[in-house]
Amino acid sequence: MSDRLVEFQREVRAFTEVRDWQQFHTPKNLAMALAGEVGELLAEFQWLTPDESVRVMSDPDAGARVAAEIGDVVIYLTRLADVLGVDLVEVARAKLADSDKRYPVEGSRGSAQKAPASVRGEVV
Amino acid sequence: MSDRLVEFQREVRAFTEVRDWQQFHTPKNLAMALAGEVGELLAEFQWLTPDESVRVMSDPDAGARVAAEIGDVVIYLTRLADVLGVDLVEVARAKLADSDKRYPVEGSRGSAQKAPASVRGEVV
Amino acid sequence: MSDRLVEFQREVRAFTEVRDWQQFHTPKNLAMALAGEVGELLAEFQWLTPDESVRVMSDPDAGARVAAEIGDVVIYLTRLADVLGVDLVEVARAKLADSDKRYPVEGSRGSAQKAPASVRGEVV
Amino acid sequence: MSDRLVEFQREVRAFTEVRDWQQFHTPKNLAMALAGEVGELLAEFQWLTPDESVRVMSDPDAGARVAAEIGDVVIYLTRLADVLGVDLVEVARAKLADSDKRYPVEGSRGSAQKAPASVRGEVV
């Protein structure tokens, strides 16, 4: 199985172990670190209009910052999954199958997420 | 290239397009959705001690909730990367290489992240 | 001193103590709870256009949800300040004075926050 | 009514208007900025043990950073409340009254929040 994400997960583990940082990497702490990085990612988008956000990668500076923040998010998410023993693609696929049932194509088309009543992170 | 994450990304895209939801999926909105899901993940850990968080997956209910929240995080992160044209593993690998230089093994071992001065999301 | 926020802080403390919940209210845990509530607040806005977000309080359902989420944010923020011994208005005023120097009116007018280079949460 | 928070809210409004920044301060953008600042606050606590977090204000450097991050959170929260026309203490008091009913003292004492089943940001 040549799975790049799983390979990368091993690299992050090695990076952590050689520095003896496993002691800090409880799921609780890693969830906080993940949230901190997502906060930095949000900060890149907070004053942009939706349209500007679509073009953000074409600005070299902003694009590089967004890529770096996403990189941090992936690192901590990967590490969290590792200490929890969770397969990221597997849990995501299970959740998507779930959403597929909860949001039948008929009735969801073009509007479901828009309704204020449906904004609680339940779109997908 | 049999990359499970990229394959999954295509599934999320198809899920989105068949519902005509691309119109809502600007990078700005997706970054918010990602942050909202990470907030729900945090909530699973907020009252747990670090030790309890280590064992969270052995509680069937809590474990299922954590897996589901991580699934949501992966879905939105994947979708965000798709609309930005960013390869998740590539940007993460670049960031890890960066951290490898900034945190040389000598001098980082067992303590670097612990210092209050180093807590700004810069551990890895 | 008739300060409504400080009075409210005392009410939250009493609410906590009568339930013997102080044991869970470490600054670390409360910061997580605060972030979790802010995530729920974000979720209320994630699919709205900027214009729709301006009118959100005129929708009775969405408005009630936004008010409730903000209420949760205030509760945990107040509680966090209480356990840390921090005066919320005082630290905010110090930060605003700081920003007043960092963002002189001349040179900041109408554009400072907009620049992608300035989006790192440093607007005010 | 000498309400320090409301007074401060007016100062933030003046700070914003003199820089002509109201145009960026939609509720959507301010919710993002608030979340970004909470992310920075989280980062201050992420590698601390619960006990270390209790003592964080006694470290001059870490204490100053925590105070500054809380200041940022208050600034954006105040500003968000202003543009929404929401009274922060009022909505928080309503929410606390709510929680008082949902978590009767008997039956909640010392344990309610602890249960993994109750961790979804519903403690207070």
Image (spheres, coloured by chain):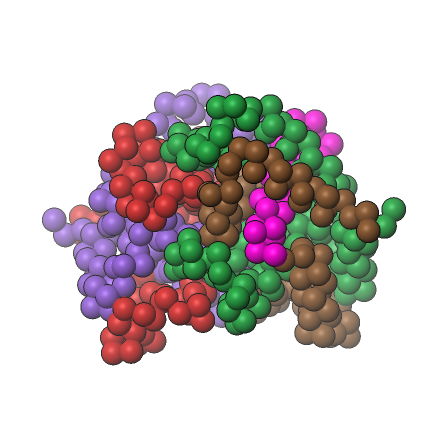
Chain colours: A red, B purple, C green, D brown
Image coords of residue C10 (percent x, y): 81, 55
The answer to whether any part of residue B89 appears in the image is no
In magenta segment, residue B105: no
Question: Taking B107 as reference, is A84 above or below it?
Answer: below
Report the residue at 71% width, 48% height from top.
D6
Q: How many marks?
A: 0
Q: Is residue B28 visible?
A: yes
Q: Which quarter of the rendering shows the C terminus of chain D?
A: bottom right
Furthest residue in direction right, as rendered: C1
Give residue D7's position: percent from left, percent from top. Answer: 73, 43
Q: Which residues are magenta?
A: D57-85
Residue occupying the point 31% across, 59% down: B24
In the image: residue B74, left or right of residue B118: left
**What residue lies at 45% left-to-right and 21% top-to-bottom?**
B106
- In this view, the residue farthest toward the left is B1
Indicate the position of residue A8 as horizontal and vertical percent values.
29, 42
Q: Is residue C3 left or right of residue C49?
A: right
Q: Is residue D80 magenta?
A: yes
Please identify the quarter of the rendering in which residue B14 is found. Answer: bottom left
Q: Residue at x 75, y 41 (%)?
A: C87
Q: Position of residue C107 (x, y in %)?
A: 48, 23
Of B58 and B13, which appears nearest the observer?
B13
C82 or A18, nearer to the observer: C82
